[in-house]
Image (tube, helix red, strand yellow):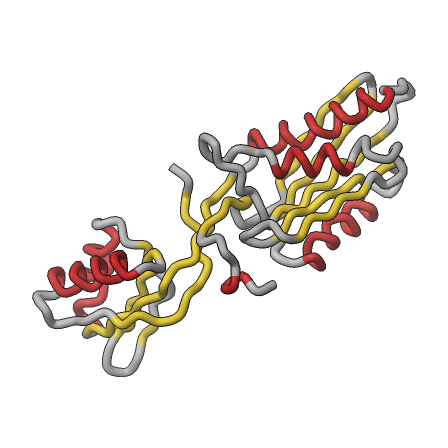
Amino acid sequence: MQEQDSRSGTYTTLAAGRDFRHELEIKRSRFITVLRRAGTEAAARDLVADLRREFHDARHHCSVFVLGPDRTIQRSSDDGEPAGTAGIPMLEALLKRETAPGVTDLSDTSAVVVRYFGGVLLGAGGLVRAYSESVSAALDLAPLVRRSRMRICSTAVPHAAAGRLENDLRATGAVMAETSYQDRHTVLRIAVPDHAAAIAAATDRVLQLTAGSATLTPGGTEWVDEAIT
């Protein structure tokens, strides 16, 4: 996936870590929703395969995934449910999820709803509502993060000054990337919004905090997770 070539500079996704699970019971049928952060089709499909093994006796493992900063890859499966009653409602639940007022940008998300039939037929409309509500209810509780394309800038400082400078930068709200330790100095890396004004402001901040003894060098771009406040 060529994230660097995307039109979008930011989008929302699940927080990194374990799968998120939520269960609903609707007219005696169990709907177990599992959400997983996935950056590739292979990773998204792995969730389906994992749950088929775990819930091998379930009747349906309906799935959907949306990938990429621009949400260019979208797939859904009814997995034996009547056509259009599971996969499409699940997909719409992902695509229409508001991550901020008026913003629908959730991506890199794979969702599977495992259904154990409870003996009561729900009808086409009931299935649409059940699968849509299952995904929506899981998303209501799932941890989300903002993922932004950032310019990674670096500055080399003496080892003795690195800790204090990093603390000072964090206190100003800077997003720190990976630090590396060289023989003669420490390289601090700062993730900065990828536009000229933000890079200039970060450069000035480093100059001020070090009394002009350190400079900031822009490097490549990376996608960085940020907490949603």
Depicted 218 relative to depicted 6: above or below: below
Residue 32 lies, in percent from the top left, at 74, 33
Residue at horizontal 28%, vertical 54%? 174
Q: Nearer the viewer, residue 164 or 72?
A: 72
State which quadrant residue 154 falls in.
bottom left
Numbered disc total: 0
State which quadrant residue 91 falls in.
top right
Residue 175 lies, in percent from the top left, at 32, 55
Depicted 176 relative to depicted 181: above or below: above
Residue at horizontal 82%, vertical 46%? 52
Q: Nearer the viewer, residue 209 or 192?
A: 192
Q: Nearer the viewer, residue 110 or 180?
A: 110
Q: Residue furthest front?
A: 7
Q: Is 223 positioned to the left or the right of 183 in the image?
A: right
Locate the C terminus by quadrant: top left
Residue at horizontal 54%, vertical 53%? 69
Q: Is 17 positioned to the left or the right of 175 in the image?
A: right
Depicted 25 relative to depicted 68: above or below: above
Residue at horizontal 40%, vertical 70%? 220
Residue 89 lies, in percent from the top left, at 73, 32
Q: Is 159 positioned to the left or the right of 53 in the image?
A: left
Residue 218 lies, in percent from the top left, at 30, 70
Q: Residue furthest left?
A: 211
Locate the N terminus by quadrant: bottom right
Q: Is 218 positioned to the left or the right of 73 in the image?
A: left
